Amino acid sequence: MVVAVALVYGITHSPGWEEVKAAFFDWGKYEDSFPEISRAFLLNVKIFCIAEAFILVFALLLAVLRSLPGPVFFPIRALAIAYADFFRGVPTILVIAILGFGVPALDVAGVPRSETFWAIVALVLIYTAYVSEVYRAGIDSVHPSQEAAARSLGLTRGQALTSVVLPQAVRRVIPPLLNDFIGLQKDTALVGILGSVEAFKQSQINTQTDFNFTHYLVAATLFVAITIPLARFTDWLVARDRRKRQAGSLV
Amino acid sequence: MSAVKIEGLRKSFGKLEVLRGIDLDVAEHEVVCLIGASGSGKSTLLRCVDRLVEWDAGTISLDGVDIDSDEMSEAELRRRVGIVFQAYNLFPHLSVLDNITLAPRKVHRVDKAQADADARRLLELFGMAAFADSYPDRLSGGQQQRVAIVRALATNPDVLLLDEVTSALDPELVGEVLAVIRELKEGGMTMLLATHEMSFARDSADRVCFLDAGRIVEQGPPDQLFGDPHEARTRQFLQRIIEAGRL
């Protein structure tokens, strides 16, 4: 707190403050460009919503494949591991650039040419790798005795997975899943490099017309405005689940 | 015909031979207690009977049918044999009722209304109707273990396997679980139990088997085994139990 106050005081009393204030905190410009950048931000929202839907499903699938036991499934496990290693290793911006610039340039009939489409594909590829690791940690955290109990009741391996292991695994990893979802939201700003006019690209365009950086601040507030309610919503989800499990008893 | 017949059962985990040729018959309506030190093979033996552990040699049959053959599907075996674990292993994300109805609904395709009604009747029978909608986390260990027993009974099994079901409980909670097992015995349930509750074994078992290092060293009616053990190792084991104040 003291540090924060000192920092604010130091910044606002620095020699260059008036110039910085004009370049970054111009309220008039903020108001002017807010509607335009908000509209562009809708593209970010669209991208991360579509991407997240695919990521949650594909990543779960990948995590399940990786947890298949026995030597029979070794090739599948190996492929899943290779996939996760590769796409966690490559910088997101490179995958977006390679797919977004490369694939449309191939000029193959029937292949979508929209750079936004390929940007979504790139984000799905990358984040599926991250999120599958989160799911895997969740699956590993469910004690094997849970599966044994399910199997002892006659459930097949698949039924034990879907009715007993996964519901517990997913509940446990909701907070880290949100973490990756926020990362995804922020990475939608990278799509701007392809020329798609999303919030970051729009603020860049605006900045280039008047050399004022307040437009970036607009984009920043929009991103934060989405993540904070989402974080509170997740907290509420987790708390509700905990309440449910600990309520309804006579003890 | 014996309900469960185990012949020449052998099982190793790596280099460790846990079961070294077990022969055991359990008759219908019989209650057989397995006693012995930890690591003597009791749990592994029970898990083999439910095919949760694959064994290396020997056969296990249920009403004369080899449980490892094509004549007995895994689902069929596990409907007819229920198992209850030391650590209850209830599903924490499901209510008590859903814990009990999971197998009837998913495996035996009983419709939900019917499964719920059956489960509530069973809970009522064991004095736990009030917990139907609670989640396991909110129950005491004794209550959880009773739910686990009801869950194992929900598929109407012929044989119940109980793997040290009171070992994880506080002493004052042991009684309520043992009372349930006694009720089941009176109802004619065939049971094979691994237990450290010697007084329970003495009072309630039809037969007691003493296991040591993967073999049944001695078996007989509880009066004989506890009162007049023939084998030196049985006497040693019981002596330690008495010294520990457990008998």
Image: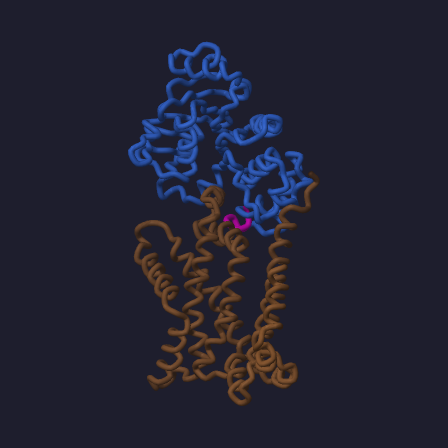
B221 in magenta: no
B106 in magenta: yes
Q: Quadrant of the N terminus of chain B?
A: top left
Position of A222 relative to A171 (above/below) = below
Left or right placement of residue A197 versus residue B61 in this view: right
Residue, x 55% and y 81% (percent of image)? A213
Residue B3 image point, x, y percent: 45, 30
Left or right placement of residue B151 versus residue A247 in this view: left
* Residue with the most extreme right position: A250
Q: Nearer the viewer, residue A205 or B88?
A: A205
Residue B244 image point, x, y percent: 50, 17
Residue A109 image point, x, y percent: 36, 86
* Residue with the most extreme front position: A15
Q: Is residue A108 visible?
A: no
Residue A195 image point, x, y percent: 45, 84
Chain with colour brown in the figure: A
**Chain B's colour?**
blue
Q: Is residue B25 visible?
A: yes
Residue, x 53% and y 46% (percent of image)? B103
| Quarter holding residue B175 | top right
Residue, x 60% and y 42% (percent of image)? B136
* Range drawn in magenta: B104-109
* Residue with the most extreme left position: B15
Position of A30 relative to B93 (above/below) = below
Residue, x 42% and y 68% (percent of image)? A126
